[in-house]
Image: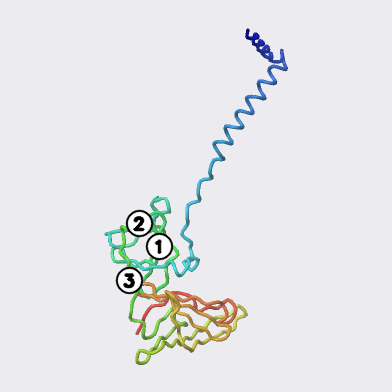
C-alpha cells in the first residue's frame, strides 16, 4: 500500500499592512532595474562632423580636388541644411574625406588659398573628382614670398629647392631655404635635411606641402597649397 503524499506547505502570506506595501514597492523597483539593465544604456547621439575654418586641420592624405558639375552649388552642414555660401559650375574645390556621401569642401580661387568663408559640405553627386596632375616639373607658388621648384634630369631622382621669407613676431624678417633630393614615400614625396622634414602631396592640379616646423624660424612653415606657375 502506497504511503499518502505529504500535503504541500501552505503558501507564505505577504507581510501585512505597510510592510506589504514596502515589499511590493521593492519588488517593482527590482523588476524595473532588471528591465533597464537588459535594454542597455541608451547610446549617445553621435556628434555631427564639422568643416574647420582652417583646411590645414584636415589630414593631407585625405585631401582630393574636385570641380563643381551642377549649375549652382550650395554648401550645407553635415546634415544637409543649406548654408549661405555658393559656388558656380566649374569652380574648383579642395575636399576632405567622405562622410555619408558628403565631403567638407573649400572653394579655391584662381591662384589663391582655400576660402575660409565659402566652405561647407558638398554631395559627391554635385562634383567630379580631378585626378592628380603628372606635370610636376617647374615652379610652384604659395604666395608672393614662398615658392618651391621641382626638377628632374633624364628620368633620375627629383630635386626640391624652395625659398621662404616671412615676418617674425619680434618685427624682424626671417628666411629659409630647401635644397636636396625628393624621395617617393607611398602616396606622397618626402624631403629631409638635418632636422627639417617636409612632405609634398599632389592633389588635383595643386601641391599641398606640410613640414615638421623645423625648416624655418619657429611658427614659420613651408606648409600650404601651391599653384603651378611655370
Q: Which residue is mark 1?
A: 105
Mark 1 or mark 3, whichever is nearer to me: 3
| Real-space Cα separation, disc 1 to disc 3, in angstroms | 16 Å
Identify the image quadrant of residue 100: bottom left
Residue 227 on image: x %, y % = 38, 78
Which residue is the site of mark 2? 123
| Picture layout, residue 143 above or below residue 5 | below
Secondary structure beneath label 3 = loop
Q: Residues within 10 Å of mark 3 (few under 14, many from 20)?
A: few
- Residue under the point 37% across and 66% down: 93
Q: Give coordinates of residue 37: x percent, y percent.
A: 59, 36
Q: Nearer the viewer, residue 206 or 30?
A: 30
Marking on residue 131: 3
Ranked by sequence position, the earlier of labels 3 and 2 is 2
> Of marks 2 and 1, which one's residue comes earlier in the chain?
1
Marks 3/2: CA–CA distance: 18 Å
Which quadrant would residue 150 be assigned to in this image?
Answer: bottom left
Amino acid at each position: 500500500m502506497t504511503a499518502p503524499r505529504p500535503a504541500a506547505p501552505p503558501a507564505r502570506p505577504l507581510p501585512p499592512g505597510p510592510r506589504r506595501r514596502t515589499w511590493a514597492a521593492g519588488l517593482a523597483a527590482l523588476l524595473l532595474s532588471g528591465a533597464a539593465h537588459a535594454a542597455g544604456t541608451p547610446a549617445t547621439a553621435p556628434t555631427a562632423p564639422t568643416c574647420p575654418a582652417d583646411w590645414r586641420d584636415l589630414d593631407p592624405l585625405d585631401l582630393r580636388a574636385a570641380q563643381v558639375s551642377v549649375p549652382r552649388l550650395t554648401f550645407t552642414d553635415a546634415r544637409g541644411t543649406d548654408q549661405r555660401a555658393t559656388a558656380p559650375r566649374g569652380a574648383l574645390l579642395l575636399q576632405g574625406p567622405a562622410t555619408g556621401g558628403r565631403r567638407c569642401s573649400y572653394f579655391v580661387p584662381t591662384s589663391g588659398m582655400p576660402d575660409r568663408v565659402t566652405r561647407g559640405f558638398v554631395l559627391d553627386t554635385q562634383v567630379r573628382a580631378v585626378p592628380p596632375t603628372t606635370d610636376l616639373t617647374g615652379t610652384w607658388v604659395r604666395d608672393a614670398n614662398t615658392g618651391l621648384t621641382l626638377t628632374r634630369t633624364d628620368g633620375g631622382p627629383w630635386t626640391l629647392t624652395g625659398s621662404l621669407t616671412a615676418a617674425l613676431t619680434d618685427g624682424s624678417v626671417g628666411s629659409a631655404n630647401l635644397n636636396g633630393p625628393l624621395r617617393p614615400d607611398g602616396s606622397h614625396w618626402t624631403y629631409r635635411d638635418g632636422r627639417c622634414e617636409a612632405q609634398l602631396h599632389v592633389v588635383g592640379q595643386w601641391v599641398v606641402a606640410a613640414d615638421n616646423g623645423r625648416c624655418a624660424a619657429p611658427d614659420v612653415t613651408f606648409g600650404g597649397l601651391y599653384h603651378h606657375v611655370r
